[in-house]
Image (cartoon, grey):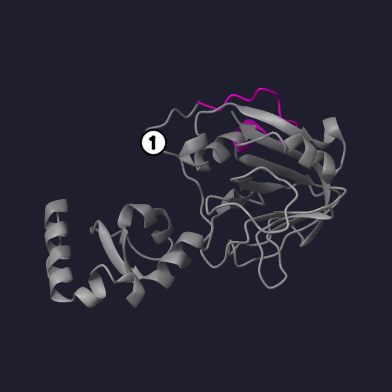
Amino acid sequence: MGNVNSSGKVDHLYTFFVQWSPEVYGKDAKEQGFVVVEKEELDMIDNFFSEPSTKSWEIITVEEAKRRKSICSYCEEDGDEDDDALPVLKTQSVLLENMHIEQLARCLPARVQGYPWRLVYSTQEHGTSLKTLYRKSAALDSPVLLVIKDMDNQIFGAYATHPFKFSDHYYGTGETFLYTFNPLFKVYKWSGENTYFINGDVSSLELGGGDGRFGLWLDADLYHGRSNSCTTFNNDILSKKEDFVVQDVEVWTFE
């Protein structure tokens, strides 16, 4: 079969597939374990596995789609964006340099793009207490960005779709992600395997989980932390070591 060179021909070909084998490619395809994925959504990750394709679509299994989307990705530069444009920070960060801010800003969901960043909590300003972090976040109704610097001078953290709070269950949505700059910038998005996004209680703050392992865990004093590979994000360890000692923490919101 020759290459398909236009979106019209792609649509025509896909219609043929639906008519030819509706049980595989039709509306019940997902139940059969297949989905149609727009190639553009996966190009960045696909480059790790294969040569660039001339097709604008690909039929893959649901499991393969989850695997590709959950693999750590580098947020690359968009040639149409202004390279010098940085979000407005209402307060200067003691942890983030312009390079960190620029790379993080590119990976934020569209609904918070363009909003100024406001510092909600800082260990340098408010002390090292998870309860204080919760209290400072209580009035928020917007996503937050958690930034951690450990004693090895590594920067890592998480974007959370909901502010941190006391909870008796996990909360948040699939836009939540983990990130690290150790040693290069990587983002770990939702794998689709579970919904253990965010959980906070008196003794700890947890992001990501499964089988007793947390993508990111902080104790009540914001002093000891841990990072494990977890099924929520299929992430690598964010810090140099699984157990780390916190140097400083910042929490930012977008408004």
The stretch in magenta equals 85-100
Instruction: Please tell me in which quadrant of the rendered image residue 227 appears.
Output: bottom right
- Position of the C terminus, as image quadrant, is top right
Image location (x, y in percent) of residue 194: 57, 66
Residue 6 in view here:
no
Instruction: Please tell me in which quadrant of the rendered image residue 54 appears.
Output: bottom left
**Nearer to us in this view, 152 or 122:** 122
Residue at 64 percent across and 41 percent down: it is 145
Q: Is residue 231 above or below residue 119?
A: below
- Which residue is the site of mark 1? 79
Residue at 66 percent across and 65 percent down: it is 229
Residue at 14 percent across and 64 percent down: it is 15
Q: Is residue 88 covered in magenta?
A: yes
Image location (x, y in percent) of residue 52: 31, 58
Q: Secondary structure at mark 1?
A: loop
Magenta-drawn stretch, dominant element (helix, strand or loop): loop
Residue at 86 percent across and 43 percent down: it is 129
Give the amino acid type for the residue marked by disc 1 in the picture: Gly
Residue density around tag 1, few if under 14, some if 14–19, many if 20 or more, within 10 Å: few
Image location (x, y in percent) of residue 24: 25, 75
**Nearer to us in this view, 134 or 48:** 134
Image location (x, y in percent) of residue 96: 68, 35
Q: How many marks?
A: 1
Q: Is residue 164 above or below residue 31?
A: above
Residue 36 in view here:
yes
Instruction: Please tell me in which quadrant of the rendered image residue 44 appears.
Output: bottom left
Side (left or right) of 82 relative to 23: right
**Nearer to us in this view, 240 or 143:** 143
